[in-house]
Image (spheres, helix red, strand yellow):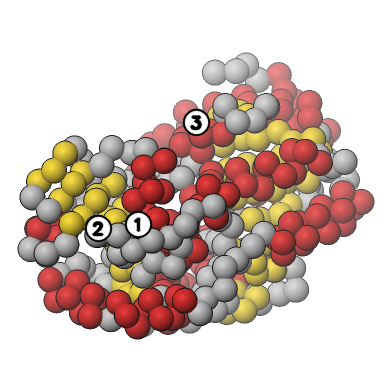
Amino acid sequence: MAKIWYSVLGDGMGHALRSDIILKKITKEHEVFITATKKAYHFLKDKYENVYEIEGQELLYEENKVKVIRTVTQFFKDLPKKSKINMSIIPKLLYSFKPDIVISDFEPLSHYYASILKIPSISIDNVHTLSECEIKEPPGQEFELKRAIFLIKFLHLRSDYYILTAFANAIPKKKNTIIVPPIVREEVRKLKSEKGEHVLVYQTTPTNTKILEILKKSNNKFKIYGMKGLGKQGNLEFMPFSETQILEDMRKAKYIIVNGGFTVISESLYLKKPILAIPIKDQLEQEFNGYSLKERGYGDYAKELSQEVLEKFEKKLPKYQQKLKKMKKWNHEKIFKELNKIIRILEKESNPKYELLKPLTKLKNK
């Protein structure tokens, strides 16, 4: 039995949902404590013992675009306060628990502590696919890919192993990187997909209000999640968030419009739903996900939604549906087989330098 520190990024829900599936299994086999930021903490805290909230930075959005300068400015503005809070929490947890292994779902602090203290580490996420694999980037995005790789490597110091979920064609650059199919919740795996009368629209941020005018001109009925407002406005129905209801609407959707988040795309593909992605600007990961959909023939993506884009997509629906019929459904066999093997290897090698933390354990909690 290994002692594991599992840390989860809370920007969006995808990291938390994926981590929940893994934690359900490894908490039965190993001793685990969990740290998480923002939404991930609130999602996981009632599901598991030993869950602790740490501070992290979320991306700031406006008009379906990441506000890079505002996000960076806010990061440095919050850094002293958040660092003080984290320094009063994390060293004490680590010194008390003394984990053999760190597993991180794209949470930066865990990578830094693992590197400084020489704790063997595993990254389980989808974003590292951009930096650790040979991929086909979206046209004209060569500079953006280099910038994304720099930021990933700057914020997330190297791991001993990478287990990366992907539906795209991705070739690992090194032997310590393993590609596995997307991890899909049991609630989704149990669903029986049907072709209903509505289109599901799921937005990461409520700032992309321009799409509403385009959707109003369509003959389709749209069920919209993630936007402000409730109730019906013509052919648009604004839905309150309900995990049960959104899965039911996903199950019966004709097709799905998303930004480009990995988890919602993966779950939609599992249900054999064609997808139109409108990625958030300056979010290369979402652009890559959308481009990969197009490359695999499961849907399309566009930088902006227009009536022309929507009509063109709908004309190709039979083609996408035919391609999706041939797609094999994923299972979790490979990821747990590989994870168990890596944990056994790293547990034997583990020799962290926890004596370095002793002076920090005297800091007062904030």
- Mark 1 vs 2, N-terminal side: 2
Instruction: Identify the element where label 2 is drawn.
Output: strand
Give the quadrant of the N terminus.
Answer: top right
> Could you give the CA–CA distance between mark 1 and mark 2, rounded to whole angstroms?
8 Å
Instruction: Identify the element where label 3 is drawn.
Output: helix
Nearest the viewer among 99 and 361 is 99
Residue 302 is drawn in which quadrant?
Answer: bottom left
Residue 336: horizontal and vertical position, in percent?
74, 57
Q: Residue at x 8, y 50 (%)?
A: 234
Quickly name the residue at label 1. 252
Asked whether residue 193 appears in the rendered view, the answer is yes
Q: Residue at x 51, y 79 (%)?
A: 326
Residue 325: horizontal and vertical position, in percent?
47, 76
Q: Is 232 on the left-hand or right-hand side of 316?
A: left
* Kind of residue sitting beneath label 3: His
- Mark 2 vs 3, N-terminal side: 3
Disc 1 packing (10 Å; few <14; some 14–19; many ≥20): many
Quickly name the residue at label 2. 198
Quickly name the residue at label 3. 42
